[in-house]
Image (cartoon, rainbow, N blue to C red):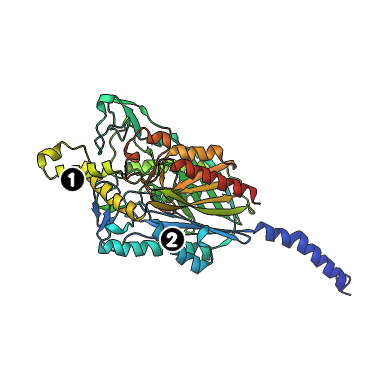
Amino acid sequence: MHRFGSSIYFKLWLSFFSISVLAPLTLAASLLAGAAAVDITPKVWPIYLRGSFYVKPSDTAHDPLHARALVLQSGDTKVAIVIVDSCMVSRANQDRAKSIASKATGIPANRILCGATHTHSAPYDFPRYETDPEKAYVEQLVSGIAQSIIDANEALQPAEIGYASSMEPSEVFNRRWFLEPEAMPPNPFGEYDLVKMNPGRGNPALLHPAGTTDPEVYALSIRTAEGRPLALLANYSLHYVGKTPAGQVSADYFGEFARLIHNRIIPHNPVPEFLGILSNGTSGDINNIDFKNPRPNRETFEQVRIVAAKVADAAYRAYTSIEHSRDPVIAMKETELTFNRRVPTESQIAYAHSVLEQAKDHKKAAELPQRATAYAERVLNFAEECEKSPTVDVLLQTLRIGDLAICTSPFETFVETGLRLKRSSPFPHTFTIELANGAEGYLPTPAQHKLGGYETWLTTNKVEFNASETLTQRLLEMLEGLKADR
């Protein structure tokens, strides 16, 4: 006789052991997660930064650029999130990167979320600007995005996940302002707006901002099954900070956050496998300038460090309150919307031609509104683009992780849209990643359209006036679908 009495008793004991011990371990390890970063700093110089009206050549890097990826798997569902230190990434090149990653990992392309941080001190990939170094960089960018997903997938391990938020209101400001009427300059189309973007620090004509802000910092924490920090994805609705070193690329405060949060979460002895990521929320009308109470002048990169530290502190405060789970519901939906483009009218085209004609005469050119020539060229180019394609197809995604929902927008999205999604979401926690799955210009709300201003100008905004309403409604429908699917 065996020590357990008989073989049948041993089998019964083993069966009980399997139910009471092995099954809970399997359930506890139901979530798998992996994280990885790939350096996408340009290797061939010069690179031209085109995030403003004036091209800025760069020939070195102040700090590295990265594609930072997370892969999450629960049961048969596997999704990827990758955030890229880029001014913006076109849908075409994001689709290329997703295709490469999908073939290598088996993650469906429609389960890959890709967004740009919108740092203005990094290049972007629009074909009409390609020089030889830029052509090389586009290929490096696409392969780097794909590789970050592949590496994160290869790093999958049993994990737990949780989320919480904290507030950091001191560094977000609405940049659209009402001014004293006599102080409002004409816009590039010879018309007068009701509000002005970036009206000037301490401008005595300032009245009040045209909109609000969103100070919430979200933190999505991933730990190993043993409770060791693996990654943290944060979200904050703030444009780039700027004043980075001239002639150098930089990830701005997004990259500095990734460096700082590492030490906040794992002090004194940061482990190399931990990955910090900061995504850009709905910041189309939000920047870091307090126009009413200007701050003292900062040295190069100083304000980047200040903002990154505050956001890292807020993310850490959120992190300390997180309850992690090993078996969250993970689900994702993707859909495509078709928007009409804002096709230039005959009168707008005629005005553009007249501006360019006046610009040939130095005396007449001096009388033109600021940036009139630049916008005249843009309008004519956009008119040709609209003639070839009067509509544009955009991708929207919603991702569910437990009771957290993440929405995407391929636009520089106004904060009002992000706040409305939070208020109306069927989930208790919701945030939006903008400039995801493409880059289609600014997306003002209809109410903000009526006020005018840079973000509403033709070619800065390229889609129909009610596009933000259509986008919001579709995202909310997708969230309701995620909530219903269990």
The residue wearing badge 2 is 95
For marks 2 and 1 on the same chain, the one whose residue lies earlier in the sequence: 2
Residue type highlighted by circle 1: Leu
Q: Position of residue 190 (x, y in %)?
A: 24, 35
- Classify mark 1: residues with Cα within 10 Å, few (<14), some (14-19) or many (20+): some
Q: Position of residue 83 (x, y in %)?
A: 44, 54
Query: As rendered, which of 20 and 111 lies closer to the eye?
Result: 111
Q: Is 29 above or below relative to 233?
A: below
Q: Position of residue 327 (x, y in %)?
A: 64, 54
Residue pictured at 42% horizontal, 33% vertical: 447
Report the Cα–Cα distance between label 2 and label 1.
37 Å
- Classify mark 2: residues with Cα within 10 Å, few (<14), some (14-19) or many (20+): some
Q: Is label 2 in contact with label 1 (beta carbons under 8 Å)?
A: no
Residue farthest to the bottom, as pictured: 1
The residue wearing badge 1 is 356
Q: Secondary structure at mark 2?
A: helix
Figure quadrant of residue 197:
top left
Query: As rendered, which of 110 and 202 lies closer to the eye?
Result: 110
Residue type highlighted by circle 2: Asp
Residue farthest to the front, as pictured: 346
Query: As rendered, which of 60 and 486 lies closer to the eye?
Result: 486
